[in-house]
Image (cartoon, rainbow, N blue to C red):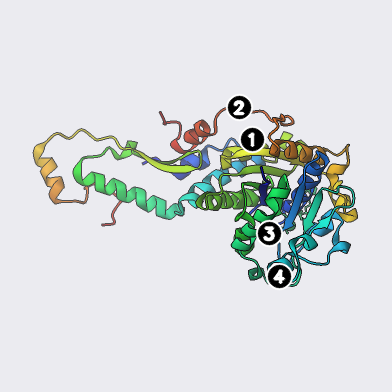
Amino acid sequence: MSGFFERLLGRSPSKGSGSTAKERLQFILVHDRINLPPERLQAMKAEILEVISKYVSVDREDVDIFLEQRDRDSLIKAEIPFSGITDQDEARKRLNQPSAAGDDTLDDG
Amino acid sequence: MGAKVVTVTSGKGGVGKTTTTANIGVALARMGKKVVLIDADIGLRNLDIVMGLENRIVYDMVDVIEGRCQLRQAMIKHKQFPDLFLIPAAQTRDKTAVSPTDMIQTADKLRPEFDFIVIDSPAGIERGFRNAIAPADEVLIVTNPEVSAVRDADRIIGLLEANNKGPGRLILNRVKPEMIKKGEMMSAEDVTDILAIKLIGIVPEDEGVIPSSNSGTPITLNENSRAGQAFRNIARRLNGEDVPFMQLTESGGFLQRITRLFSGGQSE
Ligand SMILES: Nc1ncnc2c1ncn2[C@@H]1O[C@H](COP(=O)(O)OP(=O)(O)OP(=O)(O)O)[C@@H](O)[C@H]1O
Ligand SMILES: [Mg+2]
């Protein structure tokens, strides 16, 4: 999963401290407004992915779950591509074994 | 018709609420409006000093509410503008001496006689803030172009919305254009992008502000001051006039940019 934080940090145009101030504020306010600190947001994203993986096979490389601001309102958006498994047995197995195999980033139940 | 009640508030302290209240009051009075200013900062009264009226105080807001005087008796008339009044805050009382209901009732008594009632809010989100916004028809949020002040302004805007007093309009105070040019300060556009509310004024940092408080003559009375001009513009906008902003360029929507930021360019 390409990191929200890395992306945010990596995007700084580093012109002057004014743009740093703006970027820091945008980051701070996203969390202030929904009253959800960054670690909790990460945990929530992991759990969302976990739940979806119970039902369908997910292409974890291309997962993107992110917060968006519309005026002063916040919303969460998720782009979660399926990895195209059509095998019925595989699907049934998933239903019985909630934890998606082969994933090392998510291991909470 | 009745007065419009305008509350000046901020979140973070020391960003310029009292300076703004005094200057907007004087600017409106100069426009021929009937204006009463209320200092809602109980225990830390300040507006009387900035207005140069501290020697004329006999009664204050708490005296009115506790029935020791008539509302009229607590209203101090300005020396220069006979239609400009100040109701001072009590200096020695605790904040609970006034309630939001008291403020609404007081404002309602004043409404028929005035064009504008401007309330100077204390910093923070406690009782004094709730008192100050209770009678407001419009709230002005003062902030400085600094991370902590803008963050606190955002919190206040959220609270205003939760109390059906939002979103309010923003006054960006103590702006230093030369720092913005160097990229070392957020511009008005940056701040309104972040807060997503409308701007009513941009007030530059001005060395004349402190001397004007020293002498008790709000800077807007100085024709040559840039901050004074900014406050006069705010007064005219409050009065419904369409006054263009000094060199504020609008470009690209807030939504577009923040969407890009949080989606890494993948948004639709
Ligand atoms: N545009 C300006 N240029 C220069 N100095 C300013 C400007 N605006 C305010 N100040 C100064 O900043 C200080 C704080 O201003 P002010 O008392 O109006 O803030 P406040 O928000 O009312 O503070 P408090 O939260 O304590 O009530 C004062 O010394 C004032 O002179
Ligand atoms: Mg003050």
Residue count near mark 4 (Cα–Cα under 10 Å), binned few <14, some 14–19, many ≥20: few
Some atom of ligand 1 lies within 8 Å of the CB belonging to the residue at label 1: no
Residue pointed to by mark 2: B251
Residue count near mark 2 (Cα–Cα under 10 Å), binned few <14, some 14–19, many ≥20: few
- Contact check, label 3 and label 2, Cβ < 8 Å: no
B98 vs B178, nearest the viewer: B98
B98 vs B18, nearest the viewer: B98
Please tell me which of labels 3 and 4 falls first in the chain: 4
Residue pointed to by mark 4: B67
Instruction: Look at the image and tell me whether residue B251 can be seen.
Output: yes
- The residue positioned 87% from the left and 62% from the top of the image is B56
Quarter of image, res B221: top right
**SS category of the residue bearing label 3:** loop
For the residue marked with disc 3, what is the amino acid?
A: Pro
Instruction: Look at the image and tell me whether residue B126 can be seen.
Output: no
Q: Nearer the viewer, mark 4 or mark 2?
A: 4
Please tell me which of labels 2 and 1 falls first in the chain: 1
Residues indicated by labels 4 and 1 sit on the same polypeptide chain: yes
Label 3 and label 1: CA atoms lie apart by 26 Å
Residue pointed to by mark 3: B122
